[in-house]
Amino acid sequence: MAVKNYTTIFIEREGRVGRIWFNRPEVHNAFNAIMIRELRDALADVRQDPQVRVVILSGRGTSFCAGADLNWLREIVHYSYNENLQESAELADCLEELYALPKPTIARVNGSAIGGGNGFLAACDIIIASREAVFGLSEAKLGLVPAVISPYIVRRIGEARARRYFLTGERIDAARAEEVGLINRSLDPGMLDAQIDDFVRMLLTSGPEALAKTKDLLRSIPRLSFEEAKRFSIEMIAKLRISAEAQEGMAAFLEKRKPKWAE
């Protein structure tokens, strides 16, 4: 993974874990065009690094991500339709790249996530949040809609709950966010990293290719007809069974030892 001097994010590797930090604590990690571009670059780096097996996304300071930067919004007000189209496409591509990353992703939600900030956490696989975190989909309060993040939020909480929170823009505490499925678990801030370490350990016991294919399966099956899903799944498992990773995994199981990727 390349070491780069970003201005809005910070990236580091600890063993087999890549960590990406939103690094604008002075504005509660609100995102702008620069952060989106830098995040896309960082995701490309961790995707290509064979040493990185798990990716953790979090925020510096007291917030996870406060949504779009107000100064950026002041600029966007004067953009043309085509300029806004381009800016929106950049964010959409960034979220898709995070969602489709062939490595498990964990959102470490250390504080509040407002507006578009929820898109980043919802595009991750596992979301662990501080009990002090507050969530809000308040775009309608600004005369906007949570458009670009909606595919990920609706997949997380379902249409019925999305209707409520998209329309009211009400604040959601961590307990309620866990109840509706926006996050997987909320716990005391001091326990956040220990819980994430537990998930990392579990993920590292699974085959890297198997995890990538599992994410592909989860992303593909909902879009397919029953017959298409049947064919897709049959072909996937047939190919995996003869792969080097699966051969090693099955041999390790039968020989009562750890597979090589878990050593």
Image: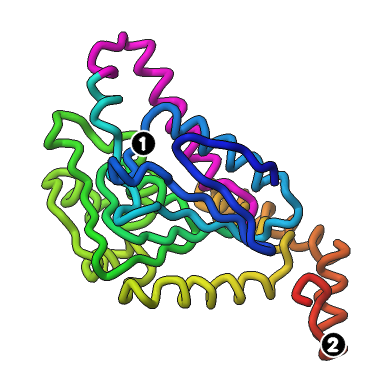
Residue 102 belongs to the span the image colors magenta: yes
Point 82% across, 87% down: residue: 257
> Which corner quadrant holds the C terminus?
bottom right
Return the residue found at the far bottom: 256
In the figure, is residue 137 to the left or right of 95? left
Point 44% across, 37% down: residue: 8
Name the spot of residue 84 as percent of width and height, x first.
35, 17
Name the spot of residue 191 as percent of width and height, x first.
39, 77
Whether residue 35 is visible here, answered yes or no, is yes
In which quarter of the view is residue 128 placed?
bottom left
For the residue pair 248 and 41, the one nearer the viewer reads as 41
In the figure, is residue 167 to the left or right of 9? left
| Residue type highlighted by circle 2 | Leu
Circles 2 and 1, Cβ within 8 Å, touching? The answer is: no
Q: Pointer 2: what residue?
A: 254
| Residue type highlighted by circle 1 | Phe
Point 76% across, 53% down: residue: 50
Point 61% across, 75% down: residue: 201
Question: In the rendered image of this protein, does residue 25 appear above or below residue 142?
Answer: below
For the residue pair 142 and 18, the one nearer the viewer reads as 18
Q: Secondary structure at mark 2?
A: helix
Question: In the rendered image of this protein, does residue 182 appear above or below residue 34?
Answer: below
In which quarter of the view is residue 146 placed?
top left
Nearer the N terminus, badge 2 or badge 1?
A: 1
Residue 42 — which label? none
Q: Pointer 1: what residue?
A: 31
Question: In the rendered image of this protein, does residue 235 appear above or below residue 32?
Answer: below
Whether residue 213 is visible here, answered yes or no, is no
Q: Which residues are magenta?
A: 75-103
Give the colouring mode of the picture: rainbow
Magenta stretch secondary structure, dominant: helix
In the figure, is residue 252 to the left or right of 70? right
